[in-house]
Amino acid sequence: MDFLRRIEDCQFPLALHDEADIRNAIVLEAAGLIEAQLPPVGVPLTEGASVINRVTAEGRAALAKAKRSG
């Protein structure tokens, strides 16, 4: 959730270069919280394009819920 908070106000598309950020994006995409173009399974994370296209409505709702919860 920290990574989602960090990117919520970024301008999209957002290119990722850091392996930890790419891993975070993979988790968020699997949860349906972002839409992204990420390396397929078996491809090294730092090879190819890793781009977040947007935070989904579900992602925005999760952020709003987290803010209300404190």
Image (tube, rainbow, N blue to C red):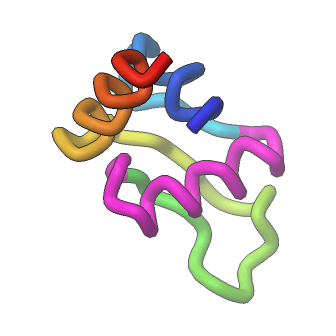
- The x, y position of residue 52, in whole percent, is 45, 41
Q: Is residue 41 left or right of residue 5?
A: right
Q: Is residue 21 above or below residue 70?
A: below
The correct choice, above or below, for 4 with respect to 24 in the image is: above
Q: Closer to the camera, 25 or 14? A: 25
Q: Quadrant of the N terminus?
A: top right
**Count the marks: how many?**
0
**Between residues 22 and 58, which one lies in front from this camera angle?**
58
At horizontal 41% and vertical 17% (from top left) the residue drawn is 67
Q: Main secondary structure of the magenta part?
A: helix
Q: Whole-percent x and y of residue 46?
A: 80, 57
**Is residue 59 among what the camera can see?**
yes
Q: Which quarter of the picture shows residue 40? A: bottom right
Name the residue at 41% across, 11% down: 9
**Magenta region: which residues?**
17-35
Outermost bottom residue: 42
At horizontal 60% and vertical 68% (from top left) the residue drawn is 39
Q: Residue furthest left?
A: 57
Left or right of residue 40, residue 44 in this image: right
The answer to whether residue 20 is magenta is yes
Give the farthest residue toward the front.
69
**Residue 42, image x, y percentages:** 72, 88
Residue at the location (43% across, 59% down)?
Answer: 29
Q: Is residue 34 a member of the stretch shown in magenta?
A: yes
The answer to whether one can see residue 54 in this image is no
Residue 19 screen position, x and y as percent: 82, 50
Instruction: Quadrant for residue 6, please give it.
Output: top right
Say whether residue 22 is left or right of residue 7: right
